């Protein structure tokens, strides 16, 4: 089974997460199939805190991938920011 989850990067006290599609059996920071975005929780100034490739997320979900709870929340928030409230 494929899972879309966060893979931690960055240095000590400065987390940076890649949003990746990876087999569920692989380690959190191990091998992955595709990088579909990133999340920077400590973005400051003009830095971009979140980028998600919605088309690739939709592709993987249509092929049976599951979103982790955190990634599901981030994608939901990102979609809310992109689509204007009607």
Image: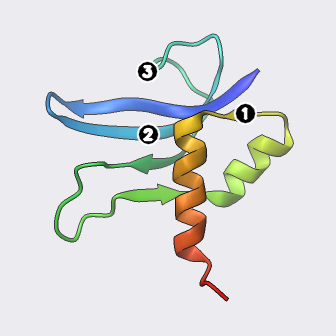
Rendering coords of residue 80 (x, y %):
58, 70
Tell whether label 3 touches label 2 (CB within 8 Å). Answer: no
Rendering coords of residue 33 (x, y %):
63, 30
Residue 58 makes an appearance in the image: yes
Q: Residues within 10 Å of mark 3 (few under 14, many from 20)?
A: some
- Asked whether, in this view, residue 53 is left or right of residue 63, the answer is left
- Asked whether, in this view, residue 66 is left or right of residue 25, the answer is right
Q: Toward the viewer: 65 or 72?
A: 72
SS at mark 1?
Answer: strand
Which residue reaches farthest bottom? 86
Q: Toward the viewer: 42 or 48?
A: 42
Q: State which quarter of the image contains the N terminus.
A: top right
- Which residue is tagged 3? 29
Q: Toward the viewer: 6 or 56?
A: 6
- Residue positioned 30% across, 48% down in the render: 41
- Which residue is tagged 2? 18
Dot 2 or dot 3, earlier in sequence: 2
Q: Residues within 10 Å of mark 2 (few under 14, many from 20)?
A: many
- Residue positioned 51% across, 13% down in the render: 27
């Amino acid at each position: 089974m494929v899972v879309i989850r966060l893979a931690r990067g960055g240095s000590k006290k400065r987390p940076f997460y890649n949003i990746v599609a990876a087999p569920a059996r692989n380690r959190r920071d191990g091998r992955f199939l595709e990088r579909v975005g990133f999340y920077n929780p400590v973005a400051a100034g003009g830095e971009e805190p979140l980028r998600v490739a919605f088309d690739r997320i939709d592709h993987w979900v249509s092929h049976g991938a599951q979103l982790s709870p955190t990634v599901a929340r981030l994608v939901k928030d990102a979609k809310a920011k992109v689509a204007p409230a009607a």
